[in-house]
Image (cartoon, grey):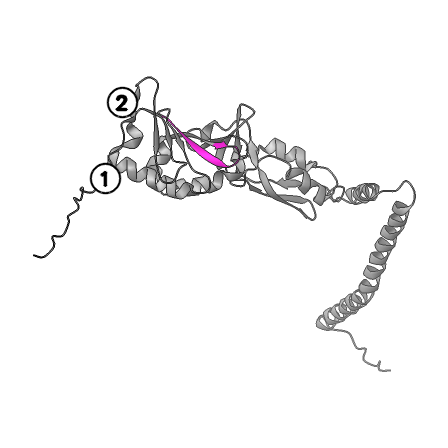
Amino acid sequence: MSRAPTSRATPRNSVKDRLSKRAMLLRKARKWARPVAWTVFGSVVVGLCAAAVQTVAPGGTIASLRERLGNATGGAGLLVAHIDLPRDGNTPKPLLRAALGVSEGDPILGFSVEHARQRIETLPWVAQATVERRLPGTIVVVVQEREPFAFWMKDKKLVLIDRNGNQVADQDFHRFDGKLPIVMGKGAERDAARLMKVLEPFPALSERIFASVRVGERRWNLHMKTGTDVMLPEGHEKEAVERLMQLHQEHALLDRPLAAIDMRLGDRLVLRPSPETGADAAQALPRPPSPPAVTPTVAKKPT
């Protein structure tokens, strides 16, 4: 009695069957993955809304919500692993870290980025700051510092100011000694930029100035290194400086031992001699020759 032949699967067919089963399982997994993800996301949103409701309740605060959220996410591994601070600049790194208020190992969602930015911008050198939170564990701090512009004598003490008159620092600025102008007097920090713009075309004059003194919040005196005070007129500093340099080129005016050069009167120049040298030091500048005298003539009557 003969037996019917039995069909056996070849190894190749067996492999194909296993691959097809895996493909079916992957399709089913992808099919269920999206609903599961949305369910998890919805649960998180509901949890946050519940926390927000508790925050609005008496005794709740945004800070407490942030703290609870930070603790929850910290337990999930969202911790500060790296803090990226500016590599260059005048603001000390420990001062930046203290103002940031966050350290490695703290929950990255447990602090306010806005409050950290505000604290950093209170530092003397900082003009603007940006604090970014980059998940999962990096905080980036970007700082734009004020540019040193001049020294201002305030309460008998030199402080460093920027072009807008904002105080930058009052210590540890010796690397700027001799490189920046000095201004003195009430309101000098606010008007210094305008005066320096007038003096900019005349570097030879700037090198002779020890300090620029604001007088009555109205005008400027240039106190020279020789001890001479150049008294500029209010609102006409540019014209006065141009005239001063012309007189110096023609008559070496700034080399004379004078106590003051008064340029406040537009039609005249007043030189005050130094007490040590006497009146000879204030020898009058050469004046243009007087026009020749004209003798009147009387016409003769015709004879």
Horizontal side, residue 162 vs residue 65: left or right = left
Q: How far across and down, in percent of the image, does residue 119 sit?
A: 68, 38
Query: Image quarter for residue 286?
Result: top left
The vertical placement of 20 against 177, above or below, is below
Determine the residue positioned at 66% across, 43% down: 139
Which amino acid type is shown beneath numbered disc 1?
Answer: Pro
Q: How far across and down, in percent of the image, does residue 67 sit?
A: 81, 41
The vertical placement of 2 against 189, above or below, is below
Determine the residue positioned at 87% across, 52% down: 49
Query: What is the spatial separation of the Cα atoms under label 1 and label 2, in whole angstroms?
Result: 20 Å
The vertical placement of 260 against 163, above or below, is above
Mark 1 or 2, which is nearer the eye? 1
Q: How far across and down, in percent of the image, does residue 33 sit?
A: 80, 63
Q: Is residue 215 magenta?
A: yes
Instruction: Return the residue found at the far right.
Output: 58
**107 or 40: nearer the viewer:** 107
Res. 80 visible in picture:
no
Magenta-colored span: 214-225
Determine the residue positioned at 57% across, 32% down: 92
Q: Is residue 106 magenta?
A: no
Dot 2: what SS? Answer: helix
Q: Residues within 10 Å of mark 2 (few under 14, many from 20)?
A: few
Q: Residues within 10 Å of mark 1 (few under 14, many from 20)?
A: few
Q: How far across and down, in percent of the image, does residue 184 sit?
A: 49, 30
- Residue 288 circle label: 1
Horizontal side, residue 79 vs residue 233: left or right = right
- Residue 74 circle label: none
Q: List the residue tagged with mark 2.
A: 280
Please, what is the dominant secondary structure of the magenta stretch? Answer: strand
Which amino acid type is shown beneath numbered disc 2?
Answer: Asp
Dot 1: what SS? Answer: loop
